[in-house]
Each structure stands twice: as structure tokens, then as C-alpha cells.
Image (spheres, grey):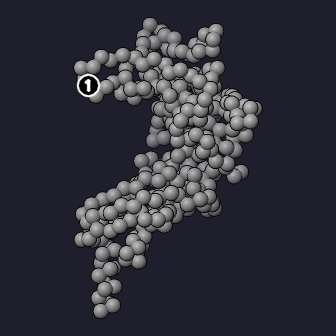
Amino acid sequence: MVIGLLGTTLVAVAQVSVEVVLDQDQFLRDEALPVKVRVTNRSGQAIELGKDNEWLTFAVESLDGKVVTKLSPPDVTGEFKLESARVATRQVDLEPSYDLGEPGRYSVAATVKIKAWSEEVSSMPRAFQIVRGTKLWEQEFGVPGAAGTPDARKYILQQANYQKSLKLYLRVADVNDNVVYRVFPLGQLVSFSQPEAQIDKSSHLHVLFQTGARSFLFQVVSPDGNVVLRQTYDYADRRPALRADDEGRVFVAGGARRLAASDLPPSFTSDPSAPRSSPALPAMTNSPAEGRNKNDGKTRKK
């Protein structure tokens, strides 16, 4: 009887598969590393997952012989029932949980524990690469601190090759690059372009860079690394360029504004009959913007 039950359990486990999915296989150092874990249930019965933080674990290894230190367990809690013949996907950012500060080749695999069956199902490892990028520009700036003394930070623009194209990245860190607030791509960059960057009186970063033969992207980023404005410009009578007035306000001079689906705030509404207009530049304040990276910078071990 025990053998029969064991055989039934093993067959059921074999009908549950786990897959690791990465939307990209190259990341800049300290960039968010979102990993999607896809669980497929073909066992003929529902399974319950996510009751604790142990149901989903990861194994991150270096393919270059480096030691990968686990800093903290990723938060994977969130109970759900996966019916038979259904697929569930859970996305987890592994960057805060592992020390991936050294450029190189790595792999990640996921293991799902099915508590009711006392069994585990693992995925095949998925390879990815951490790259350093090339620094194009950097500037220190200050933000109001809790004790009255401004916190010193810096913006860094970097470029990196990805699948035969260039991407422009922004890195927001403290002046010693020990605490990293955010690293993320601003967009595609043409090889002959030199991005323009200026910091306004509220310590917001304004970036203008060329994304195509006649197209430019303009973005405004808060000191915590949150994009508060994104606009597209085309080369018109003259090339668009960043300018600043006597009051420290930064704006785009020249070129022609083009409404785009990627605009922030959105330029288009769900109602096609609604009028389309250019959004006004949001008021810049000295208070930190709300968002994913507020006060969650981590200290990276040297």
C-alpha cells in the first residue's frame, strides 16, 4: 500500500514542471534582476502554493568560479491554488538577495516545494550575464537629509551593448558608490549620440539623448531614481537641446514635440475622441518622490 501511494505521488510530481524565464540575459551591475518562475500543473489535481517563504527557493551560481553570497531570502509569500491544466507565474527580483557586484556569467534555477506531497520540483538553470557598462557622465548633487545636513549622491550615465545595440542607463548612488538607489535603462542610444544632462535646482536630473536618425527622448528623474517625465522629440528646424533659464528650470529648446505611447504622464487616453494635448511639466519639489526605491538603497560589499 505504501509503495502504491509513493508511486502515485512520484507520477503526480512528474506532471508538475517549473521553468525560469528571463526577459533579458544581460544586466548592468546593481540593476534589478526580475526572474519569472512559471509553474505548470498537469497532475490532475489542484495544488496549494505560497503559504510560506520556503515554497519557492533559488540557486544562483557563478559560471566563472566566483562565490555568490546570499544576502537575504527573497520574499515569495502569497498563497494561491493552482488548478490542474493551469499555469501560474511568480516574478521575483533577485538583485537585493544576492551579491552580484562582480561582472561575469551566472546561472539561476528555481525549486518549488509541494508541501502536501513532501516533494520538490526544480527547473533547468538559466544563464545570464552581469556587465559593468561604460561611464559617459556623472555629477554629484545633494538632497535634504533627516538631520538637516544634505545627503550627497550622484547621477551616473552609462552605456552598454545589448544584442548588437546600445542602451543608455542611469545609476543613482551615494558619492562613494556604496549605497545604490537604482540602476535602470533610459532607452536605446544611437552610437554617434552624446547624451545631454543637467540637474535643476530641485536636484532632478534632465536627460536628452538621441534614439534614432531624427528622434530624441527627454526624461526627468527624481533623486531616488523615479522617472517623473518622459517625452519624445523629433529633429525639426534645429536639433533639440537642453537649456536652463535664470531660475534654474531646465527645458528642451528646438525640435518638435511628438506625442508617443511611452509618454509620462500619458499623452493618450483610452477614449479616442478625447483631445490630445501635451502634459505640463510637473512641479519640481525638494521632497523625495514616492516609488519603489524610496529609502531602499542597499550597501554593496566591496
According to the picture, the residue beneath numbered tag 1 turns out to be 271
Residue 297 horizontal side relative to residue 109, left or right: right
Q: Quadrant of the N terminus?
A: bottom left
From the viewer's perspective, is residue 8 above or below residue 176?
below
Residue beneath the point at 32% across and 17% down: 276
Which of the two residues, 59 or 55, is positioned nearer the viewer here?
Answer: 55
Residue beneath the point at 29% across and 88% down: 4
Locate residue 235, reporting x and y percent. 44, 14
From the viewer's perspective, is residue 192 above or below residue 225?
above
Which of the two residues, 84 or 139, is positioned nearer the viewer here?
Answer: 84
**On the image, which quarter does residue 214 sit in?**
top left
Locate residue 80, reporting x and y percent. 36, 61
Locate residue 55, reporting x and y percent. 45, 66
Residue beneath the point at 60% across and 45% down: 296
Residue 248 horizontal side relative to residue 55, left or right: right
Spot the residue most to the bottom. 1
**On the image, which quarter does residue 125 sit in?**
bottom left
Residue beneath the point at 39% across and 71% down: 114
SS at circle 1: loop
- Does residue 152 appear in this view? no
Locate residue 218, reporting x and y percent. 49, 23
Amino acid bearing label 1: Asp
Which of the two residues, 243 or 106, is positioned nearer the viewer here?
Answer: 243
- Does residue 121 appear in this view? yes
Number of residues whose C-alpha sits closer than 10 Å to that of mark 1, classed few (under 14), some (14–19) or many (20 or more): few
